[in-house]
Amino acid sequence: MECCRQLVVLVDVLLVLAFCGHIAWTVKASSQCKQALSREIRPHSVAITEFGAVGDGVTLNTKAFQNAIFYLNSFSDKGGAKLFVPAGRWLTGSFDLISHLTLWLDKDAVILGSDNPDDWPVVDPLPSYGRGVELPGGRHRSLIYGRNLTDVIITGDNGTIDGQGSVWWNWFKRKTLDYTRPHLVELMNSTGVVISNLTFSNSPFWTIHPVYCSHVIVQNVTILAPLDSPNTDGINPDSSNDVCIEDCYISTGDDLIAIKSGWDEYGISFARPSTNIIIRRLIGHNRNGSGIAIGSEMSGGVSEVYAENLYFFDSSTAITIKTARGRGGYVRNIYILNVTLVGVDTAIRFDSTFSPHPDDFYDPNALPVIERITIKDVIGNNIKVAGLLEGIEGDTFHHVCLLNIALTVTSGSPWNCSYIQGYSAMVSPETCEPLKESIYPNHSSDCYHLSNHLRSSVGILILAISQAQQQPHHQ
């Protein structure tokens, strides 16, 4: 009997230590993210005006940006450099960044994207997509672009990068484009990336697109586009790992955050997943997309996603997983908690009919694996539909777990589920039949929770960025 008491005490102690350890990790990770953002001081700095730039909103400054960055490249092995953009309206076409660079925008600085498509060069499609997302062939390069970089910071005193996307939206709606529209910021094959303390507005297409990247922080940014602007996603981590997104406000015409990993047979072949994605303290709304979306291009796989403290209002959908036959890949180990919703059409949606394909060579028998999705601690008012959860016939989505969800729903049919298997507890209105089996006491181990692997990965993320900024600088 004494042995049993000691065992119970030991278990209690271990549970308390685990709980305290989780709290300590959360606070530590948050403070380290902020420390990583503020610690880097470049020993060399120049202003864009030193290279002939004119901030009148009319003069094209592409050459000035290119020349300034070419000059600063000479300091990449001397501690890196900062390019300062002062107050003004700086019109430019696409330009490349370099490693060990800080692009700093003053409070009243606005970088404006040119409305001439010739100022946005056409580049090859991404290998994980096989073609442009909108049209076969190439795609216009982003306004701010970089590839194969290390230690890149895009920040400032809440300056603005404005893509002036309305001309692109009109061309898209009129179907007069020859190539896929450009993103506002795209970094490829890069590591140690920090984007912070800026406003991004009116992107022609997706706003911030880290693709094939690792160790990325996006913090304290505002992203704005009209609610009817097409495909103006906010932040799209794509085949990237160890990404931290926090303290952002996003209001756009499509998904606020969309996690992706390639398209059909191209994404399957490229086989680079998105994994270890942290999203915290996100506020926003949209008309045509989701607060947080996974997919629909998810053929390389998406896993270990942790999102907490989310507030979505006046929006189409809050949380979405988008996929289809032919996608292949997987979405697994997703943990979303502490979500507040007001005026949202659909709180949770699994859409398995998102069927655009890059070409006719995709494999219709490539079925996605969707499993271990946990959503907990959700409250919502003025919600039309609680959940529209549609798996695929012959490809049931497994271990979907809903816990402590309270929604005020206006629809007479709050849940609609098909080809879904999972569990629930404390869900109102009562969930659909495939999820009615209780999580407790027998199925808590079937529901995904934040793993020690993901907790430690945040520390690894911050450490890796710190090391990238401190390592000897060379090309």
Image (cartoon, rainbow, N blue to C red):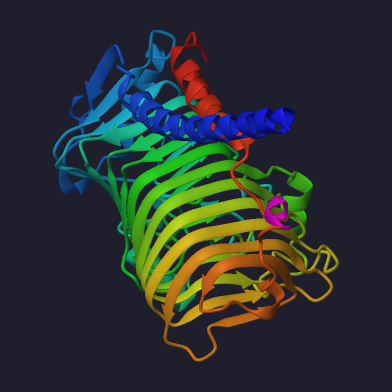
| Residue 220 in sight here | yes
Image location (x, y in percent) of residue 220: 31, 42
Q: Main secondary structure of the magenta part?
A: helix
Q: Position of residue 201 (x, y in %)?
A: 30, 55
Residue 297, quarter of the rendered image: bottom right
The quarter of the displayed image where residue 274 is located? top right
Q: Is residue 120 left or right of residue 392?
A: left
Front in this rendered view, residue 303 or 270: 303
Q: From where the camera sits, is residue 134 visible?
A: no
Relative image position of residue 312 (x, y in whole percent): 37, 64
Q: Residue at 35%, 34% (x, y): give it.
A: 154
Side (left or right) of 145 relative to 110: right
At horizontal 47% and vertical 88% (from top left) the residue drawn is 411
- In what quadrant of the picture does the N terminus appear? top right
In which image quadrant can residue 88 be found? Answer: top left
Q: Please, is residue 126 above or below residue 395 in the view?
A: above
Is 190 on the left-hand or right-hand side of 365?
Answer: left
Residue nearest the observer in this picture, 297 or 178: 297
Q: How many marks?
A: 0
Instruction: In the displayed orientation, state which residue is furthest to the bottom.
Output: 412
Look at 34% across and 61% down and name the residue there.
Answer: 284
Q: Which residues are magenta?
A: 442-446
Q: Is residue 16 above or below residue 133?
A: above
Residue 394 belongs to magenta span: no
Residue 356 in the image: state x and y as whole percent.
66, 71
